[in-house]
Image: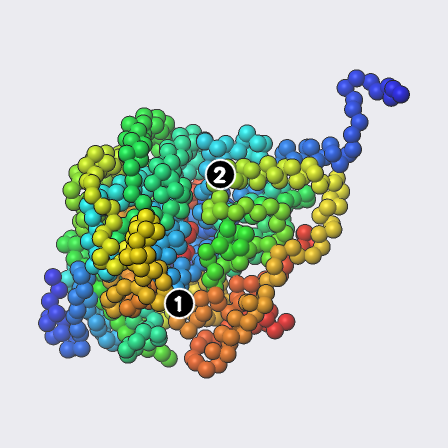
Amino acid sequence: MAVGLPENIFITKLDAAANWARSNSLWPMPFATACCGIELMATAASRHDLARFGAEVMRFSPRQCDLLIVAGRVVMKMLPVLQRIWLQMPEPKWCISMGACACSGGVFDTYAVVQGIDRFIPVDMYVPGCPPRPEQLLQAVMDMQAKVRRTGTVMGREFAIRDMPTGPAPFDSDERYRIEDSRLIQLGGFSAAATSAGRSATQG
Amino acid sequence: MPLTPVDTLESASAEREYVWTLNFGPQHPATHTTLRLVLTLDGEKVLNAVPYIGYLHSGFEKLGEHLDFNQYVTIVDRMNYLSPLANEIAWHHAVEKLLGIELTPRCRYLRTILAELMRMHDHLLNLGTTALDLGGFTAFLYFFQQREHIYDIVELASGQRFHTSYTRVGGVLFDVNTDWVNRVRKFIRDFPKVYDEVDRLLTKNRIFVDRTKGIGYLSREEAINFSAVGPVARASGVERDLRRDEPYLAYADLDFDVVCSRGGDCYARYLVRMQELLESLKIIEQAVENIPGGPVNIGVESDMVLPSKPAVYRSIEGLIQHFEVIMPNRGYEVPREQIYAATESPNGELGFYIVGNAETRAYRARTRPPSYIHFSMFPHMIRNHQLSDVVAVLGSINIIAAELDR
Amino acid sequence: MVCLSELQQKFGAKIAESHFRDNRRIDIPAAVVLPLLTSLKTEYGFNMLVDITAVDWLEYEGATDRFSVVYQLLNLDTGERLTVRVPVNLPDAVLPSVYSLWRGADWMEREVWDMFGISFSGHPDLRRILMPEEFDAFPLRKDYPLKGRGERHNFPVITRSGS
């Protein structure tokens, strides 16, 4: 049965149309803190050229971006900044965690480094490597586009259902035991006290 | 010149109602990494700048007390990530001085070539991004293309393009072959062409010169008093280059000039870095043509180096030696002493103060980071300039946040 | 060249000298830090302060003092280097600041304060520099654990639907 549409008109779902537009116009916000930032720069520079995949419009204001690329380790002084930048970005928005440090803390299992940003902000895509090669980041951007096309909805229903933290709990059992141990050791010897902030969090 | 004891605002201008405060960073494109400045402005004039750092402090020095001399290379790599190998060479230079190891001639030449490649690596990105911040995108792309060639050379030697972890106590991870030497020769042949192009783009560019000349002036006395090192100090007329003054590796055999300038401003620092690119190229050219044969690692009998992989797999002595070096409760003799040793890294004197404690890891591994010193001079250099000069000065002193905060 | 006997004459006999490889070190008591460094700068030409750092000797076998503060000096004209080591002990770990001699000492002293809790009297602006202001431990002391005491994870969690 002929529908009888005029020329130059086709029928599609609104979601599909929106996803098509969104996936092909990702504007990255480079949150480059450390070494991965240089590889992010290499991805955008001459040889690898991110522009070939339609995601080269780097904007340094979070209010103009929809793809947060966290490149490099995030330490405890920087995490509030990262959270604020994430909150400042308009919907719809996605997050790529680039490199071992952003994903899990990497080689820096120390007092200052957050062991994976997914403990504190939602992450859509992880890129392993220390640092990842530019090709890996290109692949991640393409995968991100595929994900947007596959799961996106106009009203952002896929975001609304993610109401639980996806990463590990900030204080997993290992960390809690270790903190308790160090406090016991501390009672025996001389030492500065743990921060009041840290103490209230572990007790709560 | 007389120095004022404390940097204070002139009270007259601070009380004016036009004075306002601008927060610059920690996430800002021109800071490249995680610097934060709180600027006090009168219109567009910077009255004062207060740097806040530590947004990338990750406990490097604490980690250095928990990892052994070979393992800590992976961490040192991530310190100045524009020139990872230069850090490795500096770290192992200090460790080898503590242990009293004399490197083989081949290793010394190989490390010299890599150190100079890293100097170019660092300067190329620094010059490119300085131009980028001042509005010139082309130079950045041209220079980044050359950096990719250096990445290829380093990858061919070590198997990793970025964080190579290539040096070991008493040698390097793998030896290089003829292919590698040819790749370096090709780079030496091709580089001057690109250099000339960028030189024509920037050096006499009216906009670039206007934005850098006379900006961020640092006199010779101030540079010494602030402990400035490297290209920043040399641009202010401090004739100091550890490669010449305290020769290490193979620098004593090679012919090169120490580039200095009396300008003291951003433009002088740009010129010094540009000229150092050519000097580095000269050093690499001499070193790569004269690279000696023979083993690249010191002898296994010294108990400190890892044996080669075939030796580990095919002989019991090699296996035992591997075991002795790797296992945490074995190891070799380390003096219970303290040592300070420094090399000329691309940013200046990169020193390590190591305390040995009879085990194969450092009791204390202090880094003397050039970026840290240079950023502390920033408020002094930017005062009474325009807001737009902030990025020019930041670019010219080449702050690497990971080295700054460690 | 610095002559040890000259220094001993001026600043008391407690000054000792030692060598290791090419490093030349002098150990001095905390009381003479400022006059001795002033003298080294003005009379012996050590015009550049290369580094200030500290070492915590808590777990070092046979150590008698809790900390050492280490100054690396350089004479730019002759290229001579000198390491000056000063013992410091708790509870009053205080040294005079050398900011009046070298402005480069500003951030170096702040870092030593931040990491070790050794304070410098006379420093114009002794605040924490690398760690956050509210942090109240000193991370490079040997009794502070490598992985911290939970400060690094003390933040609110943002979920996707809540942002």
Above or below, B338 against B216 in this view is below
Viewer-closest of A114 and C77: A114
Q: How is the image coloured?
A: rainbow
Mark number, residue C140: 1
The residue drawn where x is 13% and y is 64% is C2
Measured from the top left, where is residue B160 in percent x and y? 40, 43
- The three-letter code of the residue at mark 2 reads Pro
The residue furthest right is A1
The image quadrant that residue C14 belongs to is bottom left
Mark number, residue A134: 2
Q: Quadrant of the N terminus of chain A?
A: top right
> Can residue C53 be seen at all in this image of the molecule?
no
Helix, strand or loop status at disc 1 = loop
The residue drawn where x is 24% and y is 46% is B296
Q: Quadrant of the C terminus of chain A?
A: bottom right
Chain bearing tag 1 is C
The image quadrant that residue A203 belongs to is bottom right
Left or right: where A85 falls relative to B287: right
Circle 1 Cα neighbour tier, 10 Å, few/some/many (<14 / 14–19 / ≥20): many
